[in-house]
Image (tube, helix red, strand yellow):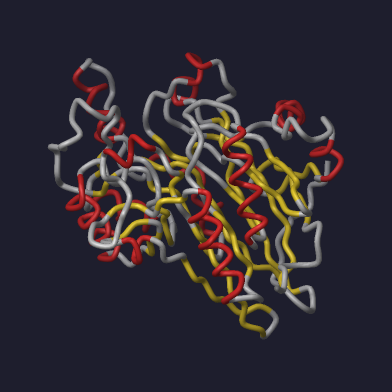
Amino acid sequence: MNSNSEYSSSTYCITFLGDTNPGETYQLRNEQLGRENILKSRGYDYGYGQFSSFLKSSDFTIANLEAAVTSIRQSELEGIKPYLDWTDPVKTPAALKRARIDAVSLANNHVCDFGERGVDETISALKNLGILYFGAGLNEQDAGKPLHHFFDLNSKKHHVIVATGFEHRQNHVRWKYYADKSSGGVNRWSRNKAFEEIHYLRESFPSAFIIAFPHWGSNYCYVSERQERLGRLLIDAGADLVIGHGSHMMQEIERYRERFIVYSIGNFVFNSPGRFRKFKVAPIGLIVRLLLFDNGENLGFKLCLYPILSDNRATNYNVRPVDERNLRALIRSFRSPNEDKEWLLQSGKLSKDIFGFHLSLSDMGKGNRQS
């Protein structure tokens, strides 16, 4: 196993974190049952502490923030939609800022739990601390805006675009979750709309490195055929890389047209008890570090996947890296069912650096595409 560092001054590191939620609703329930409320006893920074040096070393960090950042406590969806999640509009953005999280995706199934006003408060709370957001807005056009990120590398300016959407679900249409021309909400990614948005970005910014960051799939389930169809469609539309989230667990990884689809990176700091044992699934999430480098023409990349144990019942809310002993078995379990069983081990490199054990996958093409 290689122990050399993957990082150098000639690379630019973007870190992707999965489902993130301080979990006030869950912790208040714990308190009512006479159990520890970790937000009161340990504070809002506690979950991020294990990864402090990890996040500080990243040039730019993006998370999926899966709660409405609002002071509202009554929802019109009470008794209709299960799991209504709010988070403190002062403490949570401050903790995200201290953890060095630069941007958050809001295209998920909880940001609209407290209606348009909750979306508005979420956006305001993030703006107040300079945290970038994308995937939700006060109307359809605003919600559909991707994240544009520019950086200099080897005296050249480079452009990365991260686009996100929440998959189309009919029950969320009924609950008025998706933004339209006159109403706020999250960005809806039906097959057609997702393809159109990514295709437009590829046509408009042919030299940009485009990442699709969808929220999709069922809780505590492996990848579905529906996800596979949409994931491949995003690559067909022009995405260089797909990194998904939404199932609360790591899902399979696929190669498609010389591009990688990481179907779900699972939970990061998500302070609910979790239901991994109930569903009999692996309690594993991923931290993804995208290392970008100038290959002379475009941006080449290396993808570093760090597995983390995210079962709070097992860790007592202390999310931690997976050790070497479990890494190889884990990798074999999460290749796509359409792939050869050993392809991840054969294509990737098992490594250890100062942050822990991980699998690195290298760009199979020639940098990002030109159309």
Q: Nearer the viewer, residue 69 or 184?
A: 184
Q: Nearer the viewer, residue 180 or 296?
A: 180
Q: Position of residue 278 (x, y in %)?
A: 47, 14
Q: Quadrant of residue 359?
A: top right
Q: Is residue 26 above or below residue 295?
A: above
Which quadrant holds the C terminus? bottom right
- Name, please, the residue furthest toward the right: 346
**Residue shown at the point (66%, 47%) measured from the top left:** 261
- Is residue 160 found left or right of 187 in the rendered image? right
**Residue shown at the point (44%, 26%) measured from the top left:** 312
- Name, please, the residue furthest toward the bottom: 155
Q: Nearer the viewer, residue 63 or 229?
A: 229
Q: How many marks?
A: 0
**Residue shown at the point (73%, 34%) measured from the top left:** 335
Q: Quadrant of residue 253?
A: top right
- Is residue 352 found left or right of 343 in the rendered image? left
**Residue shown at the point (58%, 60%) measured from the top left:** 14
Q: Is residue 248 above or below residue 90?
A: above
Q: Position of residue 208 (x, y in %)?
A: 62, 73
Q: Quadrant of residue 155?
A: bottom right
Which quadrant holds the N terminus? top right
Q: Position of residue 179 (x, y in %)?
A: 31, 55
Q: Position of residue 244 (x, y in %)?
A: 55, 45
Q: Nearer the viewer, residue 11 or 207?
A: 207
